[in-house]
Image (spheres, rainbow, N blue to C red):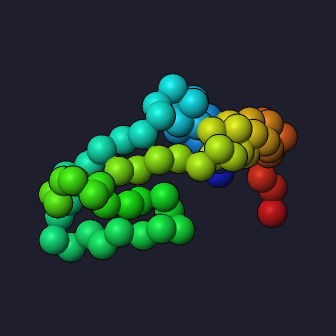
Amino acid sequence: MWRALFLAIGLSCCLLGLEAMAVEKAVLRKDSRITPNVALGIQQSAGEVGRLELTPPNWAPWGLVAAGVVTILYSFSIPKRVRG
């Protein structure tokens, strides 16, 4: 079970990193519950009140891919059956 969990987490990180390489920015509809957060790269456009722009930092794509690959390799090193 742990093996499958870590494999799924690693694959998700890799896919998210590959998507971040392909996308320059994402424009989201602003909800009243969401506030702009500069630390995550979310900022409000100057001309449009109801939209949020999400721009991934330069390190995010490669960092997510690297973390995903390491997690996938770790999942293969977990024994199939853990004996206790």
In the rendered image, which quarter is residue 44 located in?
A: bottom left
Image point 70% across, 38% down: which residue? 62
- Left or right: 24 as drawn, with respect to 2: left
Along the line of sight, the residue nearer the viewer: 19 or 30: 30
Identity of the residue drawn at 48% across and 58% down: 41
Tell me which residue sits at (30%, 72%) in the image.
35
The correct choice, above or below, for 76 with respect to 22 in the image is below
| Front position in the image: 61 or 37 | 37
Q: Residue furthest top?
A: 22
Q: Nearer the viewer, residue 65 or 26?
A: 26
> Residue 11: x and y, percent?
59, 35
Q: Is residue 24 above or below residue 27?
A: above
Q: In the orientation shown, which residue stands out farthest toward the front?
A: 47
- Which image quadrant: the C terminus? bottom right
For this view, does 36 lie left or right of residue 12? left
Asked if residue 80 shows in the view, the reply is no
Picture coordinates of residue 13, whole percent (x, y): 59, 42
